[in-house]
């Protein structure tokens, strides 16, 4: 299952500026379980969001100007995403988190659930053409995704073989190879639900059409946060849920998923960041070329 392996991420201890992220209050809390009523919100100056714990279940959020419009026009769910990222310290200096992985994976109601985020070092308006170019995802999303890092031998329990986009049907025709349990090749359709042009809360989701012997249902949603102002980055928060065959749910422990996927989160995030940085470099060259023409 492409979502299980490409986005089923690890829950590992990481640190930032000497502080363990595990010490933050919402580190192991799913976004949907955050109680907004516990957060006092004030609007402030600057380009960041400051988060402070005031009590066991009392928190303070000071929202800078660059996030004010997003917060004021967001749904409660999107506000919870901001609270989660702010609580982790991400929104003080997002670009400093490019190489600090965080993810949450847990079992609930016969489903694997996961959350993670990435900082994309390019403005959302510049990243949008790349994000919407689904037809070429197969050329960069899967780069090195089936290769173990540091020269380690052996295979992952599942390999992702293809992610071909059908423009007419608006879906990804996906092929994976299971190397354990239900070994063999499997195909499935992932329909694209595109809300990337939403001015306030851009997002897109991948939803499996029908069901399969391994997976009853699957959906993964990419929520994009685009601060205003001069900030040269955007953020993406991914939330996924995959209801799987009861055998996989019972006998595939989270410890196995974590140990198998720990390397792939790094590869996946590297692919996103490299693609964004390549696009940023291309746009920079075009801008310089345009300025030279204007001078002449």
Image: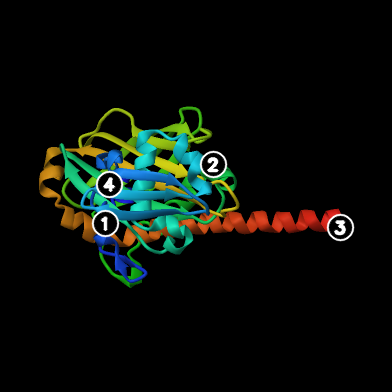
Distance of mark 2 from mark 3, alpha carbons? 33 Å
Q: Earlier in the sequence, mark 2 or mark 1?
A: 1
Q: In this rendering, would 263 be left or right of 98? A: left
Distance of mark 4 from mark 3, alpha carbons? 51 Å
Distance of mark 2 from mark 1, alpha carbons? 28 Å
Residue contact at pointers 2 and 1, CB within 8 angstroms: no
Residue behind mark 1: 10
The structure residue drawn at horizontal position 34% and vertical position 42%, both measured from the top left corner, is 80
Residue contact at pointers 4 and 3, CB within 8 angstroms: no
Distance of mark 4 from mark 1, alpha carbons? 9 Å
The structure residue drawn at horizontal position 40% and vertical position 42%, both measured from the top left corner, is 222
Label number found at residue 295: 3
Residue behind mark 4: 114
Q: Earlier in the sequence, mark 4 or mark 3?
A: 4
Q: Is residue 147 positioned above or below 4 on the image?
A: below
Mark 1, mark 3: which one is toward the viewer?
Answer: 3
Residue 139 horizontal/vertical position (percent): 49, 50
Type of colouring: rainbow
Q: Earlier in the sequence, mark 2 or mark 3?
A: 2
**Element carrying mark 4:** strand
Q: Earlier in the sequence, mark 2 or mark 4?
A: 4
**Element carrying mark 2:** loop
Residue behind mark 2: 133
Q: Earlier in the sequence, mark 4 or mark 1?
A: 1
Nearer to me, 115 or 58: 58
Q: In this rendering, would 200 be left or right of 262? A: right
Q: Is residue 284 positioned above or below 217 on the image?
A: below
In this orientation, does residue 71 appear?
yes
Residue contact at pointers 2 and 4, CB within 8 angstroms: no
Mark 2, mark 1: which one is toward the viewer?
Answer: 1
**Element carrying mark 1:** loop
* Figure quadrant of residue 146: bottom left
């Amino acid at each position: 299952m492409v979502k299980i392996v490409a986005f089923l991420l690890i829950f590992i201890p990481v640190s930032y500026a000497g502080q363990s992220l595990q010490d933050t209050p919402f580190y192991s809390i799913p976004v949907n379980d955050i109680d907004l009523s516990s957060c006092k919100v004030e609007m402030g100056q600057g380009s960041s969001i400051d988060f402070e714990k005031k009590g066991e279940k009392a928190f303070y959020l000071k929202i800078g100007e660059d996030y004010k419009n997003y917060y004021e026009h967001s749904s409660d769910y999107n506000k919870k995403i901001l609270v989660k990222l702010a609580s982790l310290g991400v929104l003080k200096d997002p670009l400093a988190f490019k190489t600090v992985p965080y993810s949450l994976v847990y079992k609930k109601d016969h489903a694997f659930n996961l959350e993670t985020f990435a900082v994309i070092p390019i403005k959302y308006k510049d990243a949008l053409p790349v994000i919407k170019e689904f037809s070429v995802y197969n050329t960069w999303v899967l780069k090195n995704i089936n290769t173990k890092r540091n020269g380690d031998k052996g295979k992952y329990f599942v390999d992702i073989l293809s992610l071909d986009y059908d423009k007419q049907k608006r879906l990804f025709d996906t092929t994976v190879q299971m190397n354990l349990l239900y070994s063999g090749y499997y195909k499935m359709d992932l329909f694209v639900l595109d809300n990337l042009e939403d001015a306030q809360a851009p997002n897109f989701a991948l939803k499996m059409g029908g069901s399969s012997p391994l997976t009853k249902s699957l959906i993964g949603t990419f929520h994009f946060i685009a601060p205003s102002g001069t900030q040269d980055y955007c953020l993406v928060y991914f939330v996924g849920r995959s209801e799987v065959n009861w055998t996989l749910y019972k006998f595939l422990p989270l410890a196995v998923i974590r140990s198998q996927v720990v390397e792939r989160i790094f590869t996946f995030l590297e692919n996103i960041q490299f693609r964004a940085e390549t696009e940023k470099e291309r746009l920079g060259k075009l801008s310089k070329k345009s300025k030279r023409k204007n001078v002449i």
